[in-house]
Image (cartoon, rainbow, N blue to C red):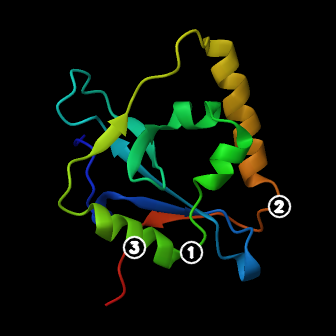
Amino acid sequence: MSALSNDPDRCEVMNLGWGPRGHGPYLVRQEGYVPGGMDLRPQRFILQKDGRWLLNLAFVLLPEAEQERQLFHSLTEVLVRLDGLAGHPVRAEATLPAGVGEAEILSRFESCTRRLLRGMRHCEVRPLTRPA
């Protein structure tokens, strides 16, 4: 497994399919480890709109309104964000908030998953590919 990267070719885009005609919002994710970190275990990260990669489990602990703000509403928005990150160092947060137990994480993960999936006509996850 590789370190996290700002390379669009390493990203997956998850079309949550709530938007018009089933397009968007989108979640951008990647598996890897934090560059320069001591923990080399691969983990899943979610790209935030500010260009920071957040540990998937930390994402589910965010308040619902903040989770919604971090979703991308078009593929153009995804590509613009990733193009802006190209060549820049990866900024990543791979820790969970202090004092959060496993039971709470699992409960919030389940709740977040149900909320994100509700209303979806279909969900598609694929590597990000740029138009030719």
Residue at the limit of the structure toward the bottom, as seen here: 132
Q: Which mark is residue 119?
A: 2
Q: Nearer the viewer, residue 41 or 28?
A: 28
The three-letter amino acid code for the residue at tag 1 is Ser
**Which percent across, then down, holds residue 81?**
39, 66
Q: Which mark is residue 74?
A: 1
Q: Secondary structure at mark 2?
A: loop
Q: Secondary structure at mark 1?
A: loop
**Which percent across, then down, holds residue 25?**
64, 66
**Which percent across, then down, holds residue 3?**
23, 41
Give the residue drawn at x 68%, y 14%: 103
Q: Is residue 14 left or right of residue 20?
A: left
How many other residues sit within 10 Å of disc 1, few (<14), some (14-19) or many (≥20)?
A: some
Task: Please tell me which of labels 1 and 3 falls first in the chain.
Answer: 1
Q: Secondary structure at mark 3?
A: helix
**Which percent across, then down, holds residue 111?**
76, 35
Q: Quadrant of the C terminus?
A: bottom left
Task: Please tell me which of labels 2 and 1 falls first in the chain.
Answer: 1
Disc 2 to disc 1, how far (Cα)? 18 Å
The three-letter amino acid code for the residue at tag 3 is Val
